Amino acid sequence: MRDISRKIVTFRTAVARAILKVAPSTISRIKDGSVPKGDPRPVAKVAAVQAAKNTSQIIPYCHQIALEFVGVEFQLNDDNIEIETTVKATEKTGVEMEALTAASVGALTIYDMVKMFDDSASIESVSLIKKTGGKSDFKTKDEKVRAAVLVMSDRTASGKSEDRSGKYMVDRFADRGIEVVEYAIISDDVDQISAAVERCLKSLKIDLLVTTGGTGIGPRDNTPEVLERFIEKSLPGVCEAIRVFGQQHNPRAMLSRGVAGVHHNTVIISLPGSLGAVEDALDVLLPHVLHALPMLRGECHGSDKAKHHAQLH
């Protein structure tokens, strides 16, 4: 079973469809209520719902998840029956297998009820029609996102310890196609932090500035105070999301004083210094935080594309 412990919870939906080929006379018998075992549709609906709820017991690698809705609809055509299932859940993993299993079992149930008088009955197809939720929803334009990564640490700046969090961040950004134009290690000195941040914001023309370290309550943890000097619009929801997710893995995440906001057209986010905390934070942030960039350019309001993004998020 795949490890999904680091994935974030999002609202997931999936729609699947099964097509059962039958004789035209079978369609007529269903419509006039002359099927010996009764109308197969309500029976198939219950079977499909039960199948969706028990998918993890049928398909070995499916996770057990709490479904919030299972819908089943039937369409009787001239020589086939369409069974369409819709499944919804707020979970860490998608619900497409639940929808597919429900559609399959719905079709099998009808097959079982009509096979006694229809030798031609057969399941033609079972397919996923659509799904939403998770990272696959987020589509970015073919544009380069420019980022800067600043590591705030007295020990790392003096060579007493090796940077792991900043390098990890650089690698994760590269995986997303984000160009890191600045990677620097700075001491926790207020003036040095301020100078580095100012250079990134005024000289590098970056879209994203992410720092790691200096967000605790120690005497040399100065990062939030320095960044707040540059933040023009606060993004409290970003840090709330990071802390909530981090709290699930480490109870000490509540002690982070990380801040986030906007300076002109640059998004600024401060992360804790530990590698685990940065891993957690990037699981939350990427790719969804990139939605802020078109918003800053005024591209996410009043257009069809903007409405589409709004529906997804």
Image (cartoon, rainbow, N blue to C red):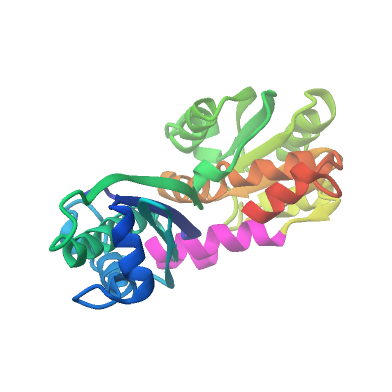
Residue at 70 percent of width and 24 percent of height: 143
Camera-side residue of 190 and 5:
5
Residue at 48 percent of width and 58 percent of height: 13
Q: Residue furthest left?
A: 116
Instruction: Work out whether residue 259 can be spotted.
Output: no
Q: Quadrant of residue 184?
A: top right
* Position of residue 162 measured from the top left corner of the image (x, y, whole percent): 42, 31
Magenta span contains residue 102: no
Q: Quadrant of residue 295?
A: top right
> Most prominent secondary structure in the magenta stretch?
helix
Camera-side residue of 109 and 227:
109
User: Which residues make up the magenta segment?
Assistant: 236-257
Residue at 83 percent of width and 38 percent of height: 265
* Position of residue 298 measured from the top left corner of the image (x, y, whole percent): 86, 42
Report how many numbered discs are placed on residues in the image.
0
Camera-side residue of 92 and 270:
92
Left or right, 13 with respect to 119, comes to right
Left or right, 309 with respect to 175, comes to right
Magenta span contains residue 247: yes
Q: Quadrant of residue 138?
A: top right
Left or right, 35 with respect to 17, comes to left
* Position of residue 109 measured from the top left corner of the image (x, y, whole percent): 22, 65
* Position of residue 202 measured from the top left corner of the image (x, y, whole percent): 85, 29
